[in-house]
Amino acid sequence: MKTIKILIIALLVITSCTGSYQVKKLKQEVMAIDSTKLYGYNRDFLKKHVNIIELKNSSSAIIVVPAWQGRVMTSTAEGDTGFSFGWINQDLIASGKTLTHINPFGGEERLWLGPEGGQYSIFFKKGKPFIYDEWQTPSFLDTTPYEIIASTDSSALFRTDVTTENYSGTILKLRIEREVTLLTEKMIASQTGIDINGLNCVAYRSENTIINQGDKEWKKETGLLSIWMLGMFNPAPSVVVVVPVKSGDENLIGPIVNDNYFGKISNDRLKIAGNHIFFKADGKSRGKIGFPPLRSTGIIGSYDSDNKILTILMCKLPEGKNEYVNSAWQLQENPYSGDAINAYNDGPLENGSQMGPFYEIETSSPAVELKPEESLNHIQFTMHLTGDVKDLDKVSRRVLGVSLEEISSAF
């Protein structure tokens, strides 16, 4: 594992000031830091293998890759030596290989479209069984580079045109547009209502749009699409995902949490406490949870108590739009009964193999009927904060509705 190199001259200076014992201790502490967890290292790694766009404002920065659908690969709140927040599949990227079903390059915010399974899936060909060998990620969500329409120091706009066919045989022609904007402290306050004063923060806004470019209206009975944002982050035993939910009758607004994606999740990994759900994100046990639109607040977060990293995702769920695509790998009785917010913890498969480890937090748009030239829009805010725990706690209480102590002691 590569580690940070310490300059000899710096050590000599420290020696004269602190003595040999302190220097030895400092060397041990600094050398123990994994350089692959630092933003500067990961930016330089990515630059060796793919063209990047770096959006930067003082100590906050993000890396966007046009070749991978304008996805945000990683970010920092403290410059080159700050934490690199996104999960990056360095082995796959360095290999230069192209895989069959999906190329999981990683990235902390990438565009996906639903549904993944069911009779309106765009991941399975018509009539094929819903098994992994027949599952295929569309190239426009995997390997197709997006055109750069505009780029500045703080934003980048991408576009691509797509023709695809769903499982039922409906041809869908669409344009995808995606704009990523790095936010200033003033913009964070005005657009999210969050006060980050005194904290290190990187925050960005992505606006994702699909436009019906065909000559027919997209109808429920022939298949609709949704915009689905996936964020892949670094797992650890100290990371817990937290989801605030709305209270109410399950018969009216749905289950408080749906954990049936890959089988029920044990109580030592999933906890319900009032109107909050806690989910362990250690990358050691495969499981996924979801929240129906009437339960969802449009907010999901995570806290790494060892590294004091608070992550928040926010989106505005449109009122009156409660039909979200169901991505279960089967023909469905109700294909528009899906979830608006999701979280996933990676873990070994039955054969012992593992894609990550990583964990995901996700938001989705509703599925909407679109006439030719009409569009569907989904905006998501991603924010990482570090700094004094008391200040982080204030943000957590205000935005997530729970203290950091409640999150870190959930399991």
Image (cartoon, rainbow, N blue to C red):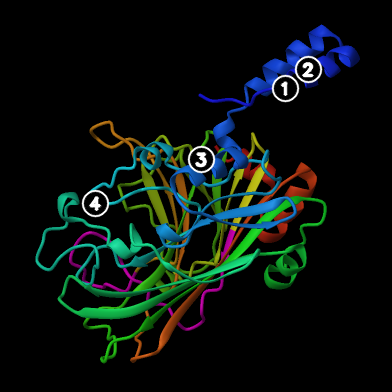
Q: Is residue 288 visible?
A: yes
Circle 3 residue: 45
Q: Earlier in the sequence, mark 2 or mark 3?
A: 2
In this view, the residue in front, 381 or 29, is: 29
The residues colored magenta run 313-337
Q: Tell me the CA gap for discs 2 and 4.
A: 49 Å
Name of the residue lying farthest toward the right = 17
Which secondary structure class fits the magenta region best? Answer: loop
Q: Regarding mark 3 in the picture, which secondary structure is present there?
A: helix
Q: Are marks 2 and 4 in contact (CB under 8 Å)?
A: no
Q: Residue at x 68, y 38 (%)?
A: 81
Q: Amino acid at mark 4?
A: His
Residue 144, located in which quarter of the rendered image?
Answer: bottom left
Residue 374: image x %, image y %?
40, 89
What residue does disc 2 label? 11
CA gap between label 1 and label 2 equals 7 Å
Q: Which comes sooner in the sequence, label 2 or label 4?
A: 2
Mark 4 or mark 1: name the one nearer the start of the chain: 1
Question: For the residue marked with disc 3, what is the amino acid?
Answer: Phe
Please tell me which residue lies in front, 152 or 201. 152
Residue 101 is labelled as 4
> Could you tell me which secondary element the residue under label 2 belongs to?
helix
The percent position of residue 60, horizontal first and vertical second, equals 69, 53
Q: Residues within 10 Å of mark 4 (few under 14, many from 20)?
A: some
Q: Which residue is mark 1?
A: 7
| Quarter of the figure with residue 21 | top right
Residue 366 visible somewhere in the drawing: no
Q: Is residue 330 magenta?
A: yes
Q: Give, as a three-letter code, the residue at label 1.
A: Leu
